Amino acid sequence: MQNHRLVGVPFIESPNQNERPDPKDIQLVVIHAISLPPGQFETPGVTQLFTNTLDPNEHPYYREIEALRVSAHLLIQRSGALTQYVAFDQRAWHAGVSSWRGREVC
């Protein structure tokens, strides 16, 4: 790892991130399943969502989510391919309101 990025892993920076309140206070790992369009895997849809470049005319479902501003630190494809979108010292943005054990915006 260098500069909070995994070495040898493609890095596509998402604009949907901000500074962590305390970069050394990481207490939670969130794991989600995502496919875009729903049920279709290994498509560019997730990268487009995380980089705000999703074309709402490409699929009917995209019209429902085009205003979302979300990201993740990492995407692991079913093939095992890994892509990083947010450096680990930054906070990736969750879809919707989130809280865990009294901690907000996590």
Image: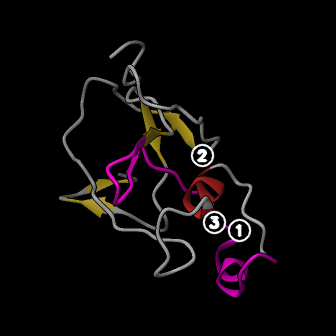
Q: Per the image, is 55 magenta?
A: no
- The x and y percentages for residue 82 are 39, 42
- Residue at image location 34% in from the left, 27% down from the top: 22
Q: Secondary structure under badge 1?
A: loop
Give the mark nearest the N terminus, 2 or 1. 2
Q: Is residue 13 left or right of residue 38?
A: right
Q: Main secondary structure of the magenta part?
A: loop
Is residue 104 shown above or below 16? Answer: below
Q: Is residue 102 above or below residue 89?
A: below
Whole-number angstrom distance, CA of label 1 to CA of label 3? 4 Å
Q: Which residue is mark 3?
A: 68
Q: Residues within 10 Å of mark 2 (few under 14, many from 20)?
A: many
Q: Which mark is residue 16?
A: 2
Horizontally, residue 46 falls left or right of residue 34, namely right
- Out of 63 and 35, give the one closest to the viewer: 35
Give the distance between the C-alpha atoms of the residues marked 3 and 2, in whole angstroms: 10 Å
- Position in image of residue 94 (x %, y %): 45, 58
Q: Position of residue 19 (x, y in %)?
A: 49, 31
Query: Do callouts 1 and 3 mark residues in contact (Cβ within 8 Å)?
Result: yes
**What is the spatial separation of the Cα atoms under label 2 and label 1, in whole angstroms?**
12 Å
> Measuring 59% from the left and 53% from the top, which residue is drawn there?
47
Residue appearing at x 55%, y 60% in the figure: 46
Near mark 3 (Cα within 10 A), the count class, few <14, some 14-19 or many ≥20, is some
Name the residue that disc number 1 marks: 67
> Which residue is at the far right?
57
Q: Residue furthest top?
A: 2
Image point (38%, 46%), residue name: 81
Q: Is residue 43 left or right of residue 32?
A: right
Range covered by the magenta-colored residues: 57-82
Q: Amino acid at mark 3?
A: Leu
Amino acid marked by disc 1 = Ala
